[in-house]
Image (cartoon, rainbow, N blue to C red):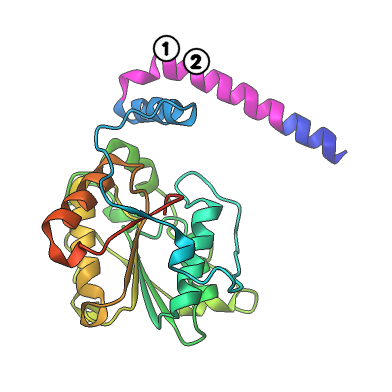
Amino acid sequence: MQQFNRVVSFIIKYVYAFVSCCYLFLVGFIFSKNRFLINQICINFGLDIKRIRPMISKSKFSEIVNTQLPVKIIKGEGTDGNTSLFELLIINLFVKTFNPNSIFGIGTFDGRTTLNLAINSLPAAKIYTIDLPKADTIPPTLFVTPGDKKYIEKNVTGIRYHNKDEKVLPEKNKIIQLYGDTAKFNFNPYFNKINMVFVDAAHSYEYVLNDSKIALKLLKNGKGIILWHDYDVWDGVTQALNELQQQNSKFNSCFHIEGRV
């Protein structure tokens, strides 16, 4: 019976995907948000024509974190917009290796990464995370790429832990949800207090520059860990980090972890 249900489920998805592709290539390409999907299809099948080339030196994650430490991965099943399972493992290893007392996530989305940060961090750790509220998604202060809009326009932020029973998911008590546009949010109460920052919000050049400079100010005494997601995936991320690493001495020590984190 389970096998039959899986087959039926696949057939439904196949037909839906086929019809969607027909629409995409016959009509949908007129709209910029759909042209982004065509680009993603090309990347998936091996045609990855990037306008911005990565320039930051690569490093193996095994040279940075202790890969022997046990980590917990919750909500391993990913969705479009999430980190990959491999990336989530590396992020969790950073937490386990360096034991930050305070973590700040710039970009919450559905809260999958945020929840994993909470579960793998110290018992007394605090996980701050910021995202746009539903009522404030249009218009953002800075430029937002068409491909980002589907991640911004969501009904619930942090749905992976939102309204979850604290008895079942006690780690959610570590999470402090903030709302606002990072280009105009008042970060002053959090500056110089954070040990680790994870930047995975809007992927435009303008927002990545903004969020990266904020991340540096968040670090306690300017020291700690900043992780960025989607370098060498989104051109805006790649361009912004290339420039920061070359032009700002405080970012000279950046490196590109193999495996896309």
Residue under numbered circle 1:
26
The residue depicted at 44 percent of the width and 56 percent of the height is: 156
The amino acid sitting under disc 1 is Leu
Check whether the beta carbons of the residues at disc 1 and disc 2 lie within 8 A of each other.
yes
Q: CA distance from mark 1 to mark 2?
A: 6 Å
Q: Residue at x 27, y 82 (%)?
A: 193
Q: Residue 108: percent from the left, percent from the top?
A: 40, 60
Looking at the image, residue 181 sits to the left or right of residue 102; the answer is left
Where's the N terminus, which quadrant?
A: top right
Q: Magenta stretch: residue 23 in it?
A: yes
Q: Position of residue 224 (x, y in %)?
A: 31, 76
Which is the main secondary structure of the residues drawn in magenta? helix
Would residue 133 be counted in the magenta stretch?
no
Give the percent coordinates (x, y) of residue 138: 25, 47
Q: Is residue 255 above or below residue 139?
A: below
As drawn, the residue found furthest toward the top would be 26
Residue drawn at x 20%, y 66% as measured from the top left? 214
Q: Amino acid at mark 2?
A: Cys
The residue at which mark 2 appears reads as 22
